[in-house]
């Protein structure tokens, strides 16, 4: 059987984080540690917190391995997007050939990469890549200035 010793500083931090940590999952982990510091058995802690016994053991293992910092960590697995490896080339393509709609951008992405994404995912991708012309709405997109106007917008110099 493993023994758990909690320093007074750890107990104070655990007691505080049980109620005041911004993330509820960390609050739950701190509740498990608090109950363990009060010498409850793992089965009792699992019943009181409505967690599985294995989850209680995992939280306690985290504490033994890395202290409170390890318990406060939240582990999220988010696989990388299939478009991530094409982001640079797509951004340069869209800067040269701005899409008129999300559907047009969707078709260009599929044509250039072979990756098919829904309209919502294409919009999110374009917004992440803020240099892409479709990333901002027309209202927030900067208007033409004398330095970036196309030649067709320049006034005819023959007129007065």
Image: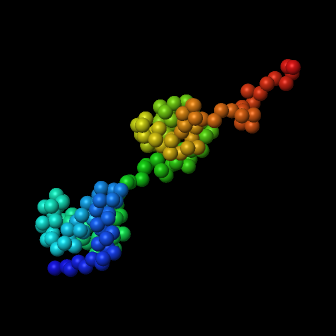
Which quadrant of the figure contains the C terminus?
top right
* Most foreground residue, 9 or 55: 9
Residue shown at 72%/31% (left/top)? 150
User: What color scheme is it?
Assistant: rainbow
Residue 5 placement: quadrant: bottom left
Where in the figure is residue 88, as x and y percent of width and height? 56, 49
Residue 51 placement, left or right of 29? left
Q: Compared with residue 13, is residue 113 higher up or lower down, i.e. above or below?
A: above
Q: Compared with residue 87, is residue 158 higher up or lower down, i.e. above or below?
A: above
Which quadrant of the figure contains the N terminus?
bottom left
Where in the figure is residue 67, as x and y percent of width and height? 33, 73
Q: Compared with residue 83, is residue 11 higher up or lower down, i.e. above or below?
A: below
Residue 80 placement, left or right of 16? right
Where in the figure is residue 53, as x and y percent of width and height? 16, 65
* Most foreground residue, 55 or 156: 55
Q: Compared with residue 47, is residue 115 higher up or lower down, i.e. above or below?
A: above
Toward the top, the furthest residue is 159
Question: What is the tally of numbered marks visible in this picture?
Answer: 0
Residue 65 placement, left or right of 141? left
Residue shown at 38%/54% (left/top)? 79
Residue 70 placement: quadrant: bottom left
Residue 40 seen anywhere in this rendered image of the structure:
yes
């Amino acid at each position: 059987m493993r023994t758990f010793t909690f320093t007074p500083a750890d107990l104070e931090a655990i007691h505080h984080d049980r109620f005041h940590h911004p993330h509820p999952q960390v609050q739950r982990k701190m509740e498990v540690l608090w109950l363990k510091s009060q010498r409850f058995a793992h089965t009792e802690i699992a019943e009181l917190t409505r967690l599985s016994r294995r989850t209680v053991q995992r939280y306690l293992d985290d504490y033994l391995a890395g202290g409170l910092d390890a318990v406060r960590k939240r582990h999220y697995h988010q696989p990388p997007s299939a478009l991530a490896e094409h982001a640079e080339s797509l951004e340069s393509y869209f800067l040269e050939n701005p899409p008129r709609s999300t559907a047009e951008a969707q078709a260009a992405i599929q044509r250039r990469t072979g990756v098919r994404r829904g309209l919502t995912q294409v919009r999110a991708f374009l917004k992440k890549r803020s240099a892409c012309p479709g990333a901002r709405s027309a209202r927030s997109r900067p208007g033409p200035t004398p330095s970036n106007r196309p030649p067709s917008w320049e006034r005819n110099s023959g007129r007065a």
